[in-house]
Each structure stands twice: as C-alpha cells, then as structure tokens.
Image (cartoon, rainbow, N blue to C red):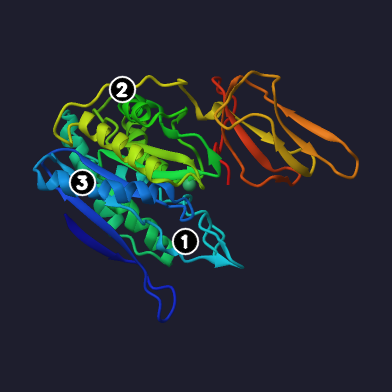
Amino acid sequence: MKVQRHPLLSPDLGTQREVVSYHFGTPGTGKKIYIESSLHADELPGMLTAWQLRQHLTRLEQAGALRGEVVLVPVCNPIGLNQRLQQSFLGRFEMGSGENFNRNYADISGELIAAVEGKLTADADQNVALIRAEARRILEGKKPASELESLRLTLLTMLIDADVFLDLHCDWEAVMHVYTGTSVWPMVEPLARYLGSQASLISLECGGAPIDDASFQIWWKLRDHYGEAFPIPDGTACVTVELRGQSDIAYEHAQKDAQAILNYLTWLGVVDGEAPPMPALSYPATPLSGTVSLTAPVSGVIVHRVAVGSYVRAGDPVLDIVNPHSDEVTTLFAEVDGVVYQRHFIRFAHTGMDIARIAGAKALRTGKLLGA
Ligand SMILES: [Zn+2]
C-alpha cells in the first residue's frame, strides 16, 4: 500500500488541509478502481466501510491477490468535516460559498474534444487510453481559485482514468440504493445485487454537475460529438452508492457492505478468486427521472405511515402532516407505484419541503433530477 498526500489550496493564513489516498496493487496490470467516501462530510457510513475495505485490501495485496489498482480515499472532504455551527455538524454545503460539495464540477468535455481532434482511431482501447491521458493533462493544468475548487480538482484528477468509480454517500433516512449511468447499468448491476440495493436509479446525467456526471459525461459527450466515426466506449462506470441513512452506522453494516464491494471487485477480476453468486434485486432499476417527491403543501408535524423501503401503490397514504392549532391532518399519498427509498430525518414540515421520495418505474421529469 502506498499513501499519497494531496495538499489543498490554503484558504487562510495558518490553515492547510489535505486529502489522503491509499493505493493498492500495481497500476497498468488490470482495471483501476477508485473509491471515495463522505464527499458530503456528514455522511459517515462510507467512512466506516472504507476503513473495513482498507484492512481487506491490505491483506489481499500482501497475499498477491490483487490485479490492477485500487485507490481508496476514506476521508475525501476535509473541508466539510471541519464545519460546525452551534454544535451542529454541517457537511453538505461549503459554508463560505453555500455550494453543495457534490455539485459544480468542471465539464472538460469541450477541451477534451479539441485535445483529441485528429488522434482518435478505429481501436477502442487506444481511444480510451488517449482520452484518459488528455483528460488527466487538462485537469492537471487547471489552477484552482479556491480551496473548494482545489478539492474538486484533486478528486476528479485522481478518478478520471478509473474503470470504476464508487462514490460512497448516504441519505437522511434511507434503504440501500444506487445512482448510475443508464449505459453502464449492466456493469453496475452486480454491485447493486451484492449490496442488496432496494432502488437503483439510472440516468444519462443527474444535472447540477455532481462528480459522477463530471466523470461520466466525457465519454458520452465525445460519442455525441463524433457519432459513428470512432469507437468510444464508456471509460468509467460511475456509481453513487447510498449506504442507507446517516444514522445507520454499525460494524455489521460496514462489514457487510465492504464484503459486497469486495465481491464486486472479484467479479470485476480485480480480486483473485471466484465471485460468489449474486442475490436477486428486490426491485429493478428505474429511471432517476421517475422518482417522485412528496412535498409538504402545509406546515406541521410529520408522522410517517410506512417504513422507509416500503413498496407503495399510487393512492396509498405515505405520511401525515398534523396541525396542532386547527386539528387538520393532511395526508400525502403516493402518486406512483414504487419504493419509498428515502426520507428526511426531520419530523417538522416546512411548507414546500421535500419530505420523502418514491422510485417509480416511469420517466416523468426532465432537467435537474437531484434535490439540493
Ligand atoms: Zn451525499
């Protein structure tokens, strides 16, 4: 295992943060897998899972059982980890700018199209190698203007040439679910099955420029540009893994989830051995654009009527909002059939608040598909 330290741009006199990455295996001998955790710094199940993975990968490397390279970044957002306000831990938005740590990543596809012009061939592997090298060069040449930008560039540069990118997050309260690109779903489905994903949300892009879109789009935007002229596969299968809810932190979860990821790495041929059989998915992959929010039309106390992870039918009651002044109880009903895969942990509804989401099977929305 090699350890690399990536200093971020100093934001203030006397402050210097760094990202630490752990590198297992040998670059160039197989696939490159990049796994980071807790980009939203207050989402910690992945940090515990990454700690478990570090032990496993160390052991596997010592046993000579790794093919290719695994880069692991268990603590990928030291800026967010340091944010507290009145005893509350706030790791989703950078406090200086108000920006979500997982939005506004650079779209380098325009620069990349210019950089590979005249160099693509009829050989898909050669094209992948060329695109990765140019993408790295473009990112390494960028000068960040802020600490937040330097964090984004550091992470994107580390993962841009990975075959598989796992971004370990969690939701407020949720069951295991994943987000990924529609065209790479066949390569991601085994991971979803090993993890026991209860909702698998697929899209071309989520919108808002999260880190997975920033990585994934270079491939489909180049394909869009060149059409049939050159073979350009998806170089990176990007997966955002939502490891249940923020409070779902337990050794049992971390051990189980780390083992699921190792099973997937075995299926990918990065870990030697035979991949164990995959459990069936409890719910098939559905379009991210088919997710439907239950939005509070009034304010009041939220009382959930179904457990997170429940399958509901259109018209089923999902939750109530109780007004203690008027005695009014406002029931929110499911608008579609699907799994209630996530919900807010706060039990007070502000009018207009997104309280819960259902993964429906039919595409309904366009534009930005994620919440804030
Ligand atoms: Zn997150």
Helix, strand or loop for disc 1: helix
Disc 3 residue: CB within 8 Å of ligand 1: no
Of the numbered discs 3 and 2, the one sitting upstream in the chain is 3
Residue 125, image quadrant: top left
- Residue type beneath disc 3: Leu
Asked whether residue 26 is in view, the answer is no
How far apart, in angstroms, are the residues tagged by discs 1 and 2?
A: 36 Å
- Residue 336 in the image: x percent, y percent? 63, 21
Contact check, label 1 and label 3, Cβ < 8 Å: no
Residue at label 2?
Answer: 278
Helix, strand or loop for disc 3: helix
Residue at 55%, 44% (x, y): give it. Answer: 172
Q: Which is more toward the observer, 178 or 58?
A: 58
Residue at label 1?
Answer: 80
Mark 1 packing: few (<14 Cα in 10 Å), some, or many (20+)?
many
Of the numbered discs 1 and 2, the one sitting upstream in the chain is 1
